[in-house]
Amino acid sequence: MKEDYYEILGISKNATAAEIKKAYRKMAIKYHPDKNPDNKEAEEKFKKAAEAYEILSNADKKARYDQFGHAAFEGGAGGFGGGGMNMEDIFSQFGDIFGGAFGGAFGGGGFGGGGRARVKGSNLRIRVTLSLEEILNGVEKKVKVKRQVQADGVTYKTCTTCNGQGQVTRVTNTILGRMQTAAACPTCQGAGESIDNKPSGANAQGMVSSEENVSIKIPPGVTDGVQLKVSGKGNDAPGNNGISGDLLVVIQEEEHANLKREGSNLHYDLYINFSEAVLGGSKEIDTLTGKVRLKVEAGVQSGKILRLRGKGLPSLDSYGKGDLLVHVNVWTPKELSKEQKQFFEKMKDDTNFKPDLTNNEKSFFEKVKDMFS
């Protein structure tokens, strides 16, 4: 079982953003490869700390993790594409958190490229529509994605503006003295490289449009609006050291013809006629796994809720499934024949036709309370 992100960083679920950052910095310095050369155990702990921080430092991802746990990022669509971050990813994303702890350039020892930032390509966003049947079991979707990729034959050279450093230093005079500031190079946008050979058909950055089939594994129990991520399937970044952006997948839930969703529970409206309510019987209803026959007790009241346990949807953050709640609605005819009308006229004062709330009948509010218990 995957370790809890809060336990990895040694913090509580109520930790502030500052406390999360402080805990990660402490762990990352402790297990940094420069301090633990050729130590695989330290490297793994370094990667786990970065993975935990990547999720918990992002308000949206943290909220999803708090609600759904690790399942919110499974199936190759989580924060790390199912395979974890490599050292280059960690150094490029979280280098600023170290300040001068490692010579002012997080990622020493060859990982960080001498302090030069790695440019990341832009993310792409798509919307995937799922039926309740697909949400029940999880599904693998293949989608066509138009990406910007490096053109065949494109080459890059060291940027002459920043000499490959990816940043330029400016010195300004202020009332406090001379101030030195560093900023991303305006020529190469921090990549440290500029285009050398641009093939025909490529844009100014050496990129061309390409259509690619991408497979997306969606875990069971996802909800409408949840955003998954497929790492590295966004637009490429220009240059030899750039990394691709990500493909963000927004889930859209398709409305079901007969079932309404509420979390992991499903609701079904069952309509029966007056005779069926009086005499009882059985009715066939739709579930996500096929039709089932449901027994209707004689004398059932309109508003009765029948619970079919385990016939709902799985929850991302726990085991088991929700329930299917069948709401019984007794349909009262608006028009009667002469004989029918005469019969019910006779029954007006019959004790069997008078409401009897002492006969173990529950109020509407009690039924709602039971439904959520």
Image (cartoon, helix red, strand yellow):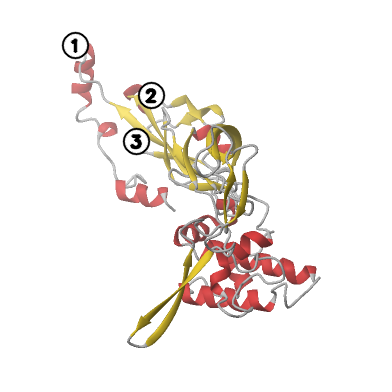
Mark 3 / mark 1, whichever is N-terminal: 3
Quick one: 137 or 195, which is closer to the camera? 195
* N-terminal-most mark, 2 or 1: 2
Determine which of the numbered discs, if any, sits on residue 276 in the image. Answer: 2
Q: Which mark is residue 338?
A: 1
Q: Amino acid at mark 2?
A: Glu
Residue 305 location (% of width, % of height): 40, 40
Between the C-alphas of marks 2 and 1, the distance is: 21 Å
Counting other residues with Cα less than 10 Å from the Cα at mark 1, is it few (<14), some (14-19), or many (20 or more)? few
> Is residue 312 visible in the rendered structure shown here?
yes
Q: Earlier in the sequence, mark 2 or mark 3?
A: 2
Q: CA distance from mark 2 to mark 3?
A: 11 Å
Could you give the CA–CA distance between mark 3 and mark 1, rounded to whole angstroms? 26 Å
x and y percentages locating residue 56 in the rendered image? 52, 65
Q: Secondary structure at mark 1?
A: helix
Which is nearer the eye, 11 or 170?
170
**43 lies left or right of 130:** right
Q: Is residue 262 left or right of residue 105?
A: left
**Crowding near the residue tagged with mark 3, few <14, some 14–19, many ≥20 C-alpha atoms within 10 Å:** some
In the image, is residue 253 above or below residue 123? above
- Say which residue label 3 marks: 301
